[in-house]
Amino acid sequence: MTTPTSEQLTISTEPVNTEKGKITLSTVEDFPPGDRRQVKVGAAIIAVFNINGEYRAIYGRCPHQFALLSQGRLQGTVICNEQTNWETEWAYEGEILTCPGHAMEFHVKTGEAIGYGFKVRTYKVVVEDGMVKLIL
Amino acid sequence: MTLHRTDQEIEITRAEAAFNPAQDQDLGLYGKELDAMTIVDVDVHVDDTLIQMMNHMEGHYKKRLEAILQADFRGEPGNSLRNMIAHIGWLGSSYDKPPRAKLATKTELMERMDKGIIDYSILFPSELLPIAYLPDPKWAAALATAYNSYMVEAYSNLPGVKIALVVAPHLPELAAKEIAKYAGNKDVVSVCIPDVGVNPPIGNQQYWAMYEAAQHYNLPISFHGIEALVHDNYPLRVSRFPTLMQVHSMGFPFTSMLQVMSVVCEGVPVRFPKLKFCVLEAGLTWIPFIMYRLDTAYRQYRTELPALEAKPSDYIREWYWGTHELEALPKRGDLAKLIDLYQGEDTTMWASDWPHLERDLIAGFMRCDMNDTLRAKVLGKNAQKFFGLEDR
């Protein structure tokens, strides 16, 4: 697997608590707002984010040309629809994951590929006993 | 995909947002399969910003370049000829979404080559892509000369790295001299004509001196476009479209279609039968359109083209094509069908446009269904033939 960044920190390469499909990622203290993780499970990759205290997880490769979404910047985007009275507005600040490959955008809360009409898979993340756990 | 198995290896890593475009993350996905082939990336760009050319300029043109480099631009477009001419009208329209345009250093280029997947990189210009639009022919030619001097000095004798010269079509006789000057360099493998803004069209007889030189020295011609110009430009007038998306999408292929038509209908392939041509960065889906559209018109208007000895598609079929920017065809088997439609099994060449903004990752090509023979040809064999490259 290609490393996400040169600064990556390998936390574990051993199977970790996969009971009931849960993977323990970290303590809450070690996974503060703004932090993110890339989780590789077999051949699949999942990107996990702490966005202002909310943990969100999304399938980790862009469906376009497979760039790693864990490296995407979280920003807002422009929308224009009936709710905005067909005016262009800036929306979803901090929730839009932009692919580092060619800038496809995904709403990290829903997996929606903005402007494409499909979703990529999202996953639940829970906190149990001070531990952040990804549910597969 | 089932992820509930407990015997799968799990790897958790801390990740960070990237502020540069993702590069080559996909090479490892196909490493084994690609290892067995000679892979040629026929459209690679390195840092050729104007400051690199300073030491390759002389006299008053060096002073002119100094003046440009002293201009106080903040942020984009910087001192970038390309951005100043091509992109400034749409500045900021992507709301600073990454990935941002990037230029590769020599170190980055060699790191990419050292991964052992890409066997050859053919270097094409970035900054000088709008050169044909420059209104001062001698200034355009001076920039091309400085570019060639810089590139040959900086990128010769590197394993797997090959160079396309740039010529300014304004002054074909000077262009021919430039071709002659570097023809003996084993790392110079093509003559690039930036084809946007060329007026009259590139097949016109006034340009034939450079075609004659290229044929004489057995250097193939590569046309490389640029998507946008903020001015009304020839042969397209795309500058009034409000979004860069529209200009980008149509600028490359329509320019290419018009220039291919010009070369063929002016009889260039008849006068220079050994000269090879390719088109880069224009996608592929338009190729059957221009081939067979011209064939239809040829029946009625053949007497306007008395030099042609065959129908237009018979000449165009001999051209080579870079795959970038791969169009978003709906089915994985569509690319092979498209190639069959324009009879391009022996002329289609994989191109990434690395590391530019819209570069294609190799995974984008590898996910397309095709037989192994065609895949090997597109990934390398066709380019080896076009550029004259040995197996690596």
Image: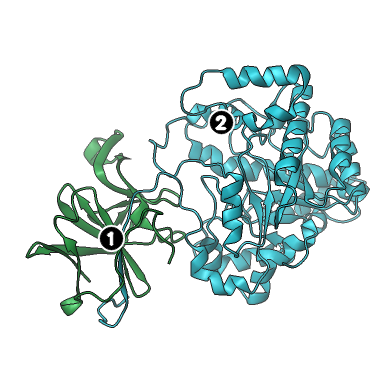
Chain colours: A green, B cyan
Q: Residues within 10 Å of mark 2 (few under 14, many from 20)?
A: many
Q: Amino acid at mark 1?
A: Ile
Q: CA distance from mark 2 to mark 1?
A: 35 Å
Q: Which residue is mark 2?
A: B83
Tag shown at residue B335: none
Q: Which residue is mark 1?
A: A58
Residue A44 placed where, x, y %?
Answer: 35, 70
Q: Nearer the viewer, residue B124 or B210?
A: B124
* Residue B23 shows up from this direction: yes
Left or right position of B321 against A18: right
Residue B165 placed where, x, y %?
Answer: 76, 42
Residue B212 placed where, x, y %?
Answer: 91, 43
What secondary structure is found at the residue carrying circle 2? helix
Q: Is residue B50 above or below residue B184?
A: above
Residue at the spot 50% in from the left edge and 21% down from the top edge:
B73
Residue at the spot 41% in from the left edge and 37% down from the top edge:
B94
Total residue callouts: 2
Which chain is home to disc 2? B
* Quadrant containing the C terminus of chain B in the rendered view: bottom right
